[in-house]
Amino acid sequence: MLAWLRPGICLLVISATCAAGQPAQAPYRMVAPDRDGIGKVYMGRQISHVMGHQGASWLERGGRRIEERTDLLIASLPLEPDFVVADIGAGTGYFSFPIAQRVPQGRVLAVDIQPEMLEIISKRILQSGIANVEPVLGGIDSPNLAVNSIDLAFIVDAYHEFSHPVEMGQGLFEALKPGGQLVLIEYRGEDASVPIKRLHKMTVQQAGKEIRALGFRGPEVLDVLPQQHILIFTKPSG
């Protein structure tokens, strides 16, 4: 749901001829869009359409916990009580609030580009009294997170929607502290039995290729969920 590009940064996947102080051009190409895609291709993958705030009720559907075992997802995140965690594409805050309880001495930055979603989160903060969730308005070209400010970022079923995945990935790389982790949760693209549209799934191979190009290591793959991969990437400490 987010995408960004900062001037003056030559990304690892961009040509080395990028001039100092000049914005790099990300390696995207345009094609005729698939029914569920935007026609923009990165590393052989067409980017999917974004689910808007009109789909908020689907995120909060009653059967989601059982269908996706979201309790296992939350329990599987490598968190410490004082972590600063970024929920990227937070939506309604479905994950932000339970994860806030896992970081009682830390906080959760609930990042979304849709003000309507952040309004929902703000109302939930008031209703729940949970004080360590902070809504953050991202832009299409920035997650609006300070450099070296977070311990872990996680993205649930949203990375495949980023219109600028290179720029978004670099933004998260910068925002993570050395040794910090980026966790992608995506429907398994290798599994035809997962009843999700093709462009809304990702394989381990594809995700690994894209994220490693940004300087991350990994992934560690956790297949503890019924339909999704948990892919844990690490920013080098040195």
Image: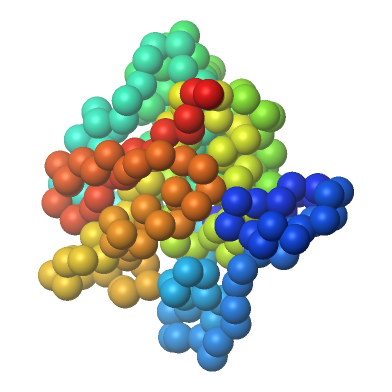
Colouring scheme applied when the structure was drawn: rainbow
Side of 190 relative to 154 (left or right):
left
Residue 121 showing in the rendered view: no
From the viewer's perspective, is residue 170 above or below residue 23? above
Spot occupied by residue 222 in the image (x, y as percentages of width and height): 21, 41
Q: Nearer the viewer, residue 49 or 9?
A: 9
Q: Nearer the viewer, residue 37 or 129?
A: 37
Q: Nearer the viewer, residue 143 or 60?
A: 143
Spot occupied by residue 125 in the image (x, y as percentages of width and height): 52, 27
Q: Nearer the viewer, residue 26 or 126?
A: 26
Spot occupied by residue 98 in the image (x, y as percentages of width and height): 36, 28
**Farthest bottom residue in view:** 32
Residue 194 showing in the rendered view: yes
Residue ID at (53%, 24%): 238
Q: Quadrant of the N terminus?
A: bottom right
Residue ID at (54%, 90%): 32
Residue ID at (62%, 35%): 174
Spot occupied by residue 160 in the image (x, y as percentages of width and height): 44, 61
State the count of labels. 0
Residue ID at (44%, 72%): 45
From the viewer's perspective, is residue 74 above or below residue 57? above
From the viewer's perspective, is residue 58 above or below residue 112? below
Side of 131 relative to 15 (left or right):
left
From the viewer's perspective, is residue 217 above or below residue 12? above
**Farthest front residue in view:** 17
**Farthest right residue in view:** 21
